[in-house]
Image (tube, grey):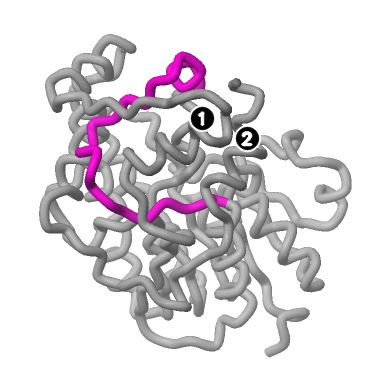
Amino acid sequence: MTSHHRKIAVTTPTGQVGSRVVRLLLQAGVRPTLLLRDASKLDPGTRARVDVAEGDQADADYVIQATRGVDTLFWVSPPGTGDDPVDAYARLGANAARAVRENGIAHTVFQSSIGAEKRHGVGEIDGLARTEEQLNDTGAAVTHLRCGYFFSNLLGDVESLRAGVLRTPWPLDHSMPWVDPRDIGEVAAARLLAANWQGTRVQAVHGPEDLTFTQVAEILGGVLGHEVKPEQLSDDEFRSVLTSVGLPAAQVDGIAGMSAGLTGDFVPEDERSVLTTTPTTLAAWARQHLVDAR
């Protein structure tokens, strides 16, 4: 089956990863089906070249209807709006698995996270681990992209970066993969377009290099032109920050549990290699996205 006849569906197509996937599929000559809440968010040039199914991924009937006749699916679970993120991710994963089964979707690429391999004890990533298991149980071909820490998480810290401080619950000397979401989109698109693989497989997306928060602060300081000091928040301090912005207890646990569960002796199952390394550096990303935060 050539890629021109293959029907590919993409969830979260206006997100940082999904929008890159959509652009590459269009450039490869594919007319994808996009699952999204609001088609007006698409630019007119894209809108004219895709099929749109509007609805909510939390609605199983909608997901099944929208993916009828689909051969290949890119599934991203949007951040849960419910009080319990692990439960929300698991419910979304159940919808994806049901659509794969009922519609006979041959290949699925799932945007997971480093840490999902632990299966338990990694905060909201446990919900992505459930989804990996649910998709594995379908018996269809599935690739789990276990992604590193998004550069774009820094966009929530623009005010403190402007003030010269990078606060984090992670130990400052803990080295881990950091990645540009756009590069995840490139790996996802390559997998979707190939769709010649079988069984269940894992492909990590580790970005160009592992970084500690101390190194991240140094890189950001170089780009922003002023010193950025890294500062570790204790678990209690971090939780009180999250509580103070109105997050319910299960969401606080979900967010705080990620850094707690991935430090210590955790090593990603899929090691850094030519298959898991992507090109965009943190400095290049920061020059594009953070320079106005000087």
Q: Residues within 10 Å of mark 2 (few under 14, many from 20)?
A: some
Decide which of 218, 160 is in the foreground and name it: 218
> What range is drawn magenta here?
158-181
Answer whether residue 164 is visible to the viewer in this image.
yes
**Residue 121 coordinates in the image, percent (x, y):** 13, 48
Amino acid bearing label 2: His
Q: Are marks 2 and 1 in contact (CB under 8 Å)?
A: yes
- In percent of the image, x 74 and y 58: which residue is there? 23
- In percent of the image, x 50 and y 22: which residue is there? 158
Snapshot quadrant of residue 213? top left
| 160 falls in the magenta region | yes
- In percent of the image, x 64 and y 68: which residue is there? 8
The answer to whether 115 appears left or right of 70 in the picture is left
Q: Is residue 264 depicted above or below 195 in this figure?
A: above
| 226 falls in the magenta region | no
Q: Quadrant of the C terminus?
A: top right
Secondary structure beneath disc 1? helix
**Residue 45 coordinates in the image, percent (x, y):** 88, 48
Q: Residues within 10 Å of mark 1 (few under 14, many from 20)?
A: some
Q: Is residue 9 depicted above or below 223 in this figure?
A: below
Secondary structure beneath disc 2? helix
Q: CA distance from mark 2 to mark 1?
A: 8 Å
Q: Which residue is mark 2?
A: 289
**Count of number-bearing discs:** 2
- In percent of the image, x 40 and y 72: which residue is there? 203
Amino acid bearing label 1: Leu
Mark 1 or mark 2, which is nearer the start of the sequence? 1
The answer to whether 220 appears left or right of 215 in the picture is right
Decide which of 91, 184 is in the foreground and name it: 184
Snapshot quadrant of residue 231? top left
Q: Which residue is mark 1?
A: 155
Q: Which mark is residue 63?
A: none
